[in-house]
Image (cartoon, helix red, strand yellow):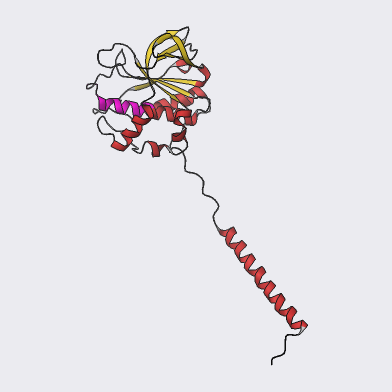
Amino acid sequence: MARGLSTKGRFAVAYLLLGAAIGAGIGTFIVLLQREGPQPAPPWSSWKPGSTTLSTRMLEIARHVGKAYKLPSGDPLVAVRLGGSQGGADFAGVAVVKKDNVRALEHQYGEDETAVFILCGQTKTCAIPEGEPSVARGAVLRREALELALYTLEYVHAIDNVLIFFPPGPGEKTLKSTLLFNRDDLSSSLSHPLRRTLPQKQPPLSGQIAQREKETVDELTVHTRYKYLGVAQNVIVIQPPA
């Protein structure tokens, strides 16, 4: 029968095992060090405003979005103008009155937390002079309004509400329709890159918006439509449609 290891031999084996364990641990540590750390999240958009002031940032956003949307002729679909206090006018916020009672206030948004844009065609009334109003063109205009709101809420953190005036529709001589976006309602779209919400990098012409994208635009704008009633004591008054 083979003789057992001596005490000295047993210590030698123990040291060898300990050395192997330490070596394996060091190797694992080195591998972990060599692994890349967590990858940074992708940017929300490939473009962002460069200014640090609120009004100038909003002007940059208006220009960036506005110049991308075209009519079939190649002319701009609309000019994107700043309204509210950013447009140089006295502005005391937005009041939403009840659907069935214009004298009953439903909600009011303060001037410091609310941005106002006007989508204005190249006429005195802001109507779009080229082509005829259509459901297809309305979908592209709502896409533009949604993109404006998303850029504003992403890059102008003081703003929580974005009110956007639409060009006059058939038979209208003045601005009558608006869309009102709130940060909470768009929180999901703000939590991931813009192109997941609006995949078409080049804004589509009327009738050329992809069906899936149109469904997204419809979903995010269906509850944002309001009638513009006028201005009372520098407050823009709007009402849900009947």
Q: Which residue range is magenta in the image?
A: 131-145
Counting from the top left corner in percent of width and height, residue 107 is at 48, 16
Residue plotted at (76% across, 85% down) = 6
Main SS category, magenta section: helix
- Dividing the image into 4 quarters, which one contains the N terminus? bottom right
Q: Residue furthest bottom?
A: 1
Q: Compared to 96, does 154 lie above or below?
A: below
* Residue 132 belongs to the span the image colors magenta: yes
In the rendered image, which quarter is residue 99 located in? top left
Residue plotted at (48% across, 20% down) = 114
In the rendered image, which quarter is residue 176 located in? top left
Query: In terms of depth relative to the viewer, which is nearer, 29 or 215?
Result: 215
* Residue 234 belongs to the span the image colors magenta: no
Q: Compared to 12, does 175 lie above or below?
A: above
Q: Residue furthest left?
A: 131
Query: In terms of depth relative to the viewer, which is nearer, 101 or 169?
Result: 101
Counting from the top left corner in percent of width and height, residue 37 is at 55, 52
Number of marks: 0
In the rendered image, which quarter is residue 70 located in? top left
Q: Compared to 144, does 177 lie above or below?
A: above
Q: Residue furthest right?
A: 7
- Dividing the image into 4 quarters, which one contains the C terminus? top left
Residue 50 visible: no
